[in-house]
Image: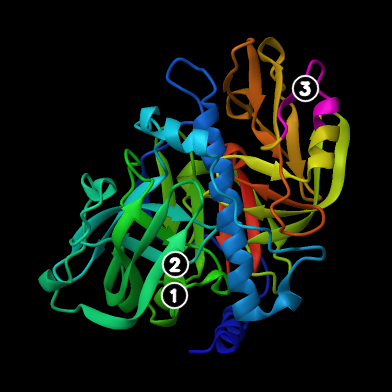
Amino acid sequence: MSLSLIVLALAVLATAGPVRREQGTRIPFRGRNSLMSSEGRFDHDRAVRQVVRDHNKHRNNLINIEANLGREAFNEGAEIKAFVHLPQSKRQAEELTDQEAEEYWTGSIQIGTPGQPFAMDFDTGSSDLWIPSYTCTSPECKSKHKYNPNNSSTSVRRNDTLNTGYGDGTRVSGSVYSDTVVVAGVEVKDYTFGIAEAMTGQTGVSEDGILGLGLPGLMTLPSVPILYRAVTEKAMQKYIFAFKLSKNHSELYLGGTDESLYTGDIEYHPLMEHRGFWQIGNASLSVGSTTVVSDVKTVIDSGTTLIYGPPEDVAKFYESIPGSKIYDTINGFYTFPCDTTPSDVAFSWGGKGWSIDAENFSHGQTEDGQCIGAIAGRDLGMGDNVWLVGDSFMQNVYTVFSADDKAIGFAALK
């Protein structure tokens, strides 16, 4: 199916009015820690890997949007930046870094007939599905579940290849297959995905692979987002899913919202048209009663830990927090006094102010006793006034993604 037909079909699926709460299915998550050690110290090496990975991930997304939708889908000022490599010193230090604490928001799926289990990172900032192959002999594959097409009666080899690199030392390459995929009881037959026959840079990372929950414009593989297939094949009634992200009792809910996890109404905001991302506009960022930046666009990404904004706007933001200063100019990290962690930082999209609590705003202490803020100044090439809003924000709210209504919604957590 061509991408133009997919976009048209999504428009047909759209319904008028607010999203209704529907019965759906739950996927419990294991949480992940922030970019700090168990002693509360900021892990700079790990944070740099995260920045490099996020930079290259969204560089790849812009390349996919250009191929799938054309440059007219870019935000104004968007630019495909150069691929960034991890500095050599960081790559050497990587082997000494304890990555066991770096848990992603992982939940279980099954692939094949009979089903083979995998723990997946569910990522709204990408759209492809990939898992390790049973032929992978890389050390990174040693502790992971591996897909064996020979053990599935519904497996089909496709004439395509998987080859993705993130510049942080992470690269996956291999083959492309189709098979039956089951996510929390939602079954999609003959779904196309990649299997990694070689992996680098993922030692100690707890998830087996990535299941992208992004929109069609981000696809690399010759497929469509898995939830789109689930809706068109009537395996899921509504193209709606919702996240609760926390260190305990996290959940992805498919086909609606889980009313037991939030209170009050869900505040919805329309997607910006034809951008490829889960992107909403008219956002502002405040500290207390002072609005620091306004009229910005925001991409909501469950696969990103930090919050990234244009460097000049982020500098302006930290000027409003007494005692703040730049810590890492290249990667855009700032520090602030740990004893005055701001608890009144909030995003608003024209309605309620959605706050980032003090625990989620801090990513650990530096050697001089300061704390690292969750907001970093980094130009990812995504366009003028575009912010990338990751888990440091999402952990504070119940977040709903609706392709049916072309909207993202937020509600207060119970």
- How far apart, in angstroms, are the residues tagged by discs 1 and 2? 7 Å
* Three-letter amino acid code of the residue under disc 1: Leu
Q: Which residue is mark 2?
A: 128
Image position of 331 with respect to 59: above or below: above
* Three-letter amino acid code of the residue under disc 2: Asp
Give the residue furthest to the front: 88
Q: Is residue 111 left or right of residue 358?
A: left
Inspect the magenta stretch and tell me whether residue 348 lies in it: no
Q: Residue 325 shows which numbered tag? A: 3
Q: Which residue is mark 1?
A: 221
Residue 247 shows in the view: yes
In magenta, the rendered stretch is 317-329
Contact check, label 1 and label 3, Cβ < 8 Å: no
Residue drawn at x 51%, y 31% as measured from the top left? 45
Q: Position of residue 141 (x, y in %)?
A: 25, 50
Which dot, 3 or 2, sits closer to the camera?
3
Residue drawn at x 86%, y 36% as measured from the top left? 292
